[in-house]
């Protein structure tokens, strides 16, 4: 395909891809991935969320997953935004969008810090009038990410081992879930019923990642 035609059909990215396939180097090679500046964990609810505790439970699960991603990349976050909203496709039903942002001092990757902040965000933004609302989606977004080793110190940093205890607790949590499967151990704020969890009755079998989904020949 001529490069000019590729650009007219797609974009400069498609044009460069065609050139690369034709042996012309035009996409620089990154030997190390660029540092992440932010991350998000968002999900649509399997069933509408109508009360505060259900929304808190869903956001707690998202915050726990976000904290796990931070630790995987050895990062800490300085800012978190928690949001939840109704579906804009629900014609004739009450609509509401809520979000709050908190700043962490000191910066953290501890799931317990994020979950405490999530509850504070929901309590501060919960609608006092109108409704009843059926919230369809929620999520958390983390910003101001830096490497854990470069975490800025504050004047009032606690020097009694609190950071080490936090790290040890999170390492234990990650180790249990790595050995026995995701969500084997969770924070109590997530709950166990998880009515907000995404529905997956029609999901394709995961042949490449789940032994239980492999077909059995008899």
Image (cartoon, rainbow, N blue to C red):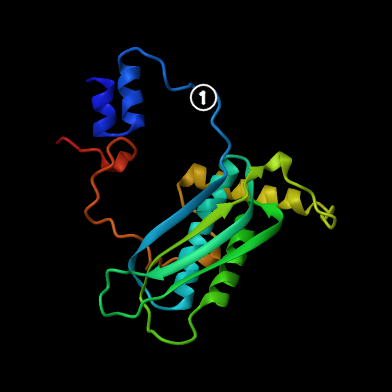
Circle 1 is placed at which residue position?
30
Q: Is residue 15 visible?
A: yes
Label 1 neighbour load within 10 Å: few <14, some 14-19, many 20+ = few
Q: Is residue 185 visible?
A: no
Question: Residue 159, percent across and down?
Answer: 84, 52
**Residue 178 percent coordinates (x, y):** 51, 43
Residue furthest left in the image: 218
**Number of numbered discs:** 1
Q: Which residue is painted at 48% across and 81% down in the image?
A: 127
- Between 96 and 181, the one lying in front of the other is 96
Image quadrant in which the C terminus is located:
top left
Q: Is 17 placed left or right of 157 in the picture?
A: left
**Which part of the image, by quadrant, shows the N terminus?**
top left
**In the rendered view, would you say 69 is above or below 112?**
above
The spot of residue 40 in percent (x, y) is: 49, 52
Residue 37 picture quarter: top right
Judged from the image, the secondary structure of the residue bearing numbered disc 1 is loop
Query: Which one is in front, 143 or 28?
Result: 28
Which residue, as the protein is rendered here, is positioned at the far top? Answer: 23
Of residue 111 and residue 129, the one placed in the foreground of this image is 129
Against 93, residue 151 (above or below) is above
Q: Is residue 209 left or right of residue 218?
A: right
Asked if 2 appears above or below 72 in the picture, the reply is above
Residue 95 in the image: state x and y as whole percent.
36, 76
Who's the residue at 52% across and 64% down the image? Answer: 82
Left or right, residue 166 beside residue 60: right
The residue at the point 73 percent across, 52 percent down is: 165
């Amino acid at each position: 395909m001529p490069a000019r035609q590729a650009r007219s059909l797609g974009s400069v990215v498609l044009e460069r891809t065609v050139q690369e396939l034709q042996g012309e180097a035009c996409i620089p090679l990154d030997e190390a991935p660029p540092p992440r500046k932010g991350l998000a964990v968002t999900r649509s609810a399997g069933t509408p969320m109508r009360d505060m505790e259900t929304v808190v439970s869903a956001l707690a699960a998202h915050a726990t997953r976000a904290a796990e991603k931070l630790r995987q990349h050895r990062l800490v976050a300085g800012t978190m935004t928690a949001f939840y909203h109704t579906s804009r496709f629900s014609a004739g039903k009450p609509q509401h969008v809520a979000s709050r942002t908190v700043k962490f001092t000191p910066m953290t990757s501890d799931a317990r810090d994020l979950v405490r902040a999530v509850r504070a965000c929901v309590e501060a933004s919960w609608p006092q009038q109108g409704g009843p609302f059926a919230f369809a989606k929620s999520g958390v977004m983390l910003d101001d990410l830096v490497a854990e080793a470069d975490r800025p110190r504050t004047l009032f940093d606690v020097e009694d081992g609190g950071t080490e205890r936090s790290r040890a607790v999170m390492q234990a949590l990650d180790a249990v879930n790595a050995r026995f499967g995701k969500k084997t151990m969770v924070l109590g704020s997530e709950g166990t019923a998880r009515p907000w969890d995404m529905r997956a009755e029609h999901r394709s079998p995961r042949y490449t990642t789940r032994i239980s989904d492999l077909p059995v020949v008899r």
